[in-house]
Amino acid sequence: MISMYKTNKILMVAALWVPLVLLALAPQEERQAEERFDKVFRELLDRYVAEINPEKLSNRAIAALLEELDPYSEYILKEDEYRLDVLTKGQYGGIGLKLGRQNDSLVVITPLVGSPAEQQGIRPGDVIVKIDSVWTRDLSSRDAAQIVRGPQGEPVTLLVKRYGVNELLEFRLTRKIIRVEDITYSGMLTGDVGYVKLASFSRYTAIHLEQEIHRLQQAGMTAFILDLRGNPGGLLNVALQTANLFLPQNELILETRGRLVSANKQYYTTRRPILPETPLIVLMDRGSASASEIVGGILQDLDRAVVLGSRSFGKGLVQTVYPVDEGATLKLTTAKYYLPSGRLIQKAVYGEDLIQEDAYPVDSLGYATRQGRKVQGGGGITPDVEVAPLLVDRYERQLWQRGLFFQFAVQYVNGRNDLALPFKAADSDVEAFRDWLTDEEYHYATDFMHWLDNSLSLVDTTVSVSDSIVDLLERARDLASVMEQQAFDANYDRIRLGIEREVAAVVGGTSARFAAGIHEDLVLQEALGLIRQPSAVASILHGESVAETIPAE
């Protein structure tokens, strides 16, 4: 136990007290804090009523301490390092599956194009019952992904239940290097407008984006929309490479500031742009964070692009990865980043009561772009043109949350081998979905239904109950059924679109799902209406008032 304890003590000191100097030279307050922590840990191991696993205790203690500082500093154990590989290497060893949980089952959302899973015939909607020797009933999708991933060349066996097939299917697959899907859709929209949707900023994102832009240019692109909605970010250097695709060489585009001198850096563009003057709109929303905000903020501050959509998340912190030992890695917040206007867009201060001094506090002061347009610090990127996304009705939202469109689409596609895209759902398909919901005994969860279910549960049918009470509750159930059908009818067109999107996804994957919803994407349609008017884009970038956004045709 003593040797294990000493090993873990070294691990804890390295992770928690970096960059303190040697103990003999440390300030008294820091030395006392370390000694106190060390003593409590030792007493727990020596005196607790039951023997404690020192490695597990230290791992959890470190993770808990980091949580007190900010949400982005992490202690990453070796079994979770694939998450770092996805970002830093842009790839991982696996079989190429997107997994999710539906109705207590581990379900294949989609196999990636060209992956071992796709090549071996695994389909969307397949239920994974077993991974090697591990049953999946109580396995989270994250834990399942961790088991499925592994070194290139190693085998993994899946036991699969497929709709319409009575017996379980066994697939023995060999893991290979899977490239991260950082671009989920790319293509020409109406006329000569190019469009790319970025899902992340991993190692090869800027390279892939440049390739797509060249392809769109060859197709006649004269205007470009970069969609960063829902993009949680990624690598700082990749975000800067992405911004450089649109900006002149030797331009100061970002500055980082931290407590250590090594964290204070200025970043400049290093190459000539590939789209120096093409009209550009960047789409952002609440899900755009970190590297997405760096790209959108740089292009906004330098008046290179119109930012359209809704306010972004507000993450202005930079993390650095430090190896602790062979079994763990520390991802630590070491700096804050500042956009060309000088603003910090971090939305809040974390660990406020723990921090003794912060040389770079969050502020919400006003700043100006190169052309003199007003922008704000703190709280994310405010778009130049605010367009709220379509609010999803409660009924439709529940259908999506429960995966009902997807489940129906899997069964709908089964046996229709000649189904082609784009798929358009007829009224008969929507009515088939209505009938399917009834067969599946789905009920719209409203406050009224909750009250009704509680009321029915209180009725004891073994004793005499007033006929009027039973009759009242039955009438209430009939009313609930009518309300549910009315909710379905009120969302009829949206339900049609949901069916079309998920059938497209089952047939053609993620990009097909997105393509099926383009015409119903109000934010994107607003961007198309604006970018078709270059004078309106120029007016916004020069700080001139625009009476209203040009609506989409």
Image (cartoon, rainbow, N blue to C red):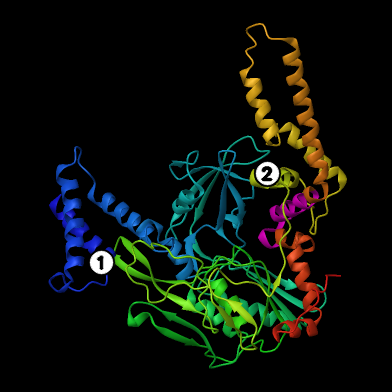
Q: Which mark is residue 481?
A: none
Q: Magenta stretch containing residue 267, yes or no?
A: no
Nearer-the-camera pick, 113 or 66: 66
SS for tag 1? Answer: helix
Task: Say whether disc 1 or disc 2 marks the residue closer to the N-terminus.
Answer: 1
Q: Magenta stretch containing residue 502, yes or no?
A: yes
Counting from the top left corner in percent of width and height, residue 294 is at 54, 76
**Which residue appears at 55% of the width and 65% of the height?**
232
Nearer-the-camera pick, 102 or 63: 63
Q: Is residue 271 above or below residue 469?
A: below
Q: Residues within 10 Å of mark 2 (few under 14, many from 20)?
A: some
- Which secondary structure type mostly characterizes the magenta part of the structure? helix
Q: Report whether residue 90 is seen.
A: yes
Counting from the top left corner in percent of width and height, residue 80 is at 40, 57
Residue extending furthest front?
365
* Magenta stretch in the rendered image: 496-511
Residue under circle 1? 17
What amino acid type is highlighted by mark number 2?
A: Gln
**Which residue appears at 34% of the width and 54% of the height?**
64
| Horizontal relation, residue 174 to residue 191: left or right | left
**Which residue appears at 78% of the width and 83% of the height?**
220
Task: Measure how far apart labels 1 and 2 are at the Cα level.
Answer: 46 Å
Q: Which marked residue is nearer to the observer: mark 1 or mark 2?
A: 1
**Which residue appears at 76% of the width and 13% of the height?**
468
